[in-house]
Image: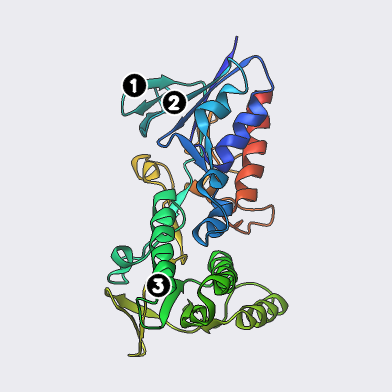
Amino acid sequence: MNKNVVIIGGGYGGLRAVEHLAKYEDIEITLIDKNPYHYLQTEAYGYIAGRFDMHDVVIDLEDWCGGFGKNVHFIYDKAQNVDFEAKFVQTSNESIAYDYLIIATGARTNFFSFIEGLREHSYGVKSLHRAHNFRVEFENLIYKKLQNEDNNEDINLAIGGAGLSGVEVAAEMAHIIHTYSKTIGRRAKNIKIYLIDASKTILPGMSDFLVKNTQKRLESLGVHILTDTFIDKLDESYIYFKNSQKLKYHFMIFTGGIKASSLNEQIDVQKNRISQFIPNSELNIGDMENVFAIGDCVEIRDIDGNILPPTAQTAERSAEYVAEAIRKK
């Protein structure tokens, strides 16, 4: 008898689970996602900086699933809730039964509510539409520079959060601004990048060697680093800091944190402060042996109890682990 596996979420974890399970003819796979595409978030920083185009960062999920044959199906719909007793996923349009369920819904940018104006006046890169909106606005800025419409005014690009994501965004933007110097000449020097973090250093928690070398490299690229700097609020023109200083800005990209997808909030199992599921050692949630969570929507720990970072690599490894567990059942 075939196993019916439903996977909610077409991110890195969900796709890797499909790849592993599709090898077995006795497993029927249904992938559900609210978007018709997979967004390559690892390439997002290159996309917003203009190094990649749209076709470089998206994959059509229906075509991708179709390449595996008749035992892999894609449903373009939003999963709204799960009935664990009846074993079905409720979407906007239908109920989808499962024998095994993998929740791989990922995470979204956590625009901290205690920073007034953050959500309204900043961009995130966890979703394609926010990344695209930033790119369009940034390219409009470059056009104005080209036309000299801004009278050589300084343009300040602020990046909130100096973890791995913030550092990568800063480096990408510095590189692309250097590239734009071929188009707009010395006016490119009027575009300033500020990397802001409340921690005492960039890359908090990383080794001193990595922190020092990364900071040296960023500064050589022209990035202004503001550490031990707490953002109080934003309005349309200024970032206000807790130390009563302020910074005029034109764009703000926020990379300072994540929280799990909204589906997690509908599911009554143990979760942490950012709504990630807290699973057992087998990545089951709610003591249900046939329900698993992988990727950014779940708090995953290593063998020593350390929380693993929410990266594509972590999502894919957790997917491989769960896929193998289902295969053996």
- Assign the C terminus to one quadrant of the image: top right
Give the image location of residue 267, x and y in percent: 38, 39
Amino acid found under the numbered disc labelled 1: Glu
- Asked which quadrant contains residue 115, the reply is bottom left
Amino acid found under the numbered disc labelled 3: Gln
**Residue 111 visible, this orientation:** yes
What secondary structure is marked by label 3? helix
Q: Give the class, few, some or many, for how many residues have Cα within 10 Å of label 3's Cα (few <14, many ≥20).
A: few
- Asked which quadrant contains residue 164, the reply is bottom right
What secondary structure is marked by label 2? strand
Amino acid found under the numbered disc labelled 2: Ile
Q: Residue at x 58, y 53 (%)?
A: 43
Q: Nearer the viewer, mark 1 or mark 2?
A: 2
Q: Residue furthest front?
A: 147
Q: Residue at x 68, y 19 (%)?
A: 24
| Circles 3 and 1 in contact, beta carbons < 8 Å | no
| Circles 1 and 2 in contact, beta carbons < 8 Å | yes
Q: Nearer the viewer, residue 40 or 176?
A: 176
Residue position marked by numbered label 3 in the rendering: 147
Q: Residue furthest bottom?
A: 244
Residue position marked by numbered label 2 in the rendering: 75
- Marks 1 and 2, how far apart in space? 10 Å
Q: Residue furthest right?
A: 209
Residue position marked by numbered label 1 in the rendering: 94
What secondary structure is marked by label 1? loop
> On residue 142, which mark appears?
none
Give the image location of residue 256, x and y in percent: 46, 67
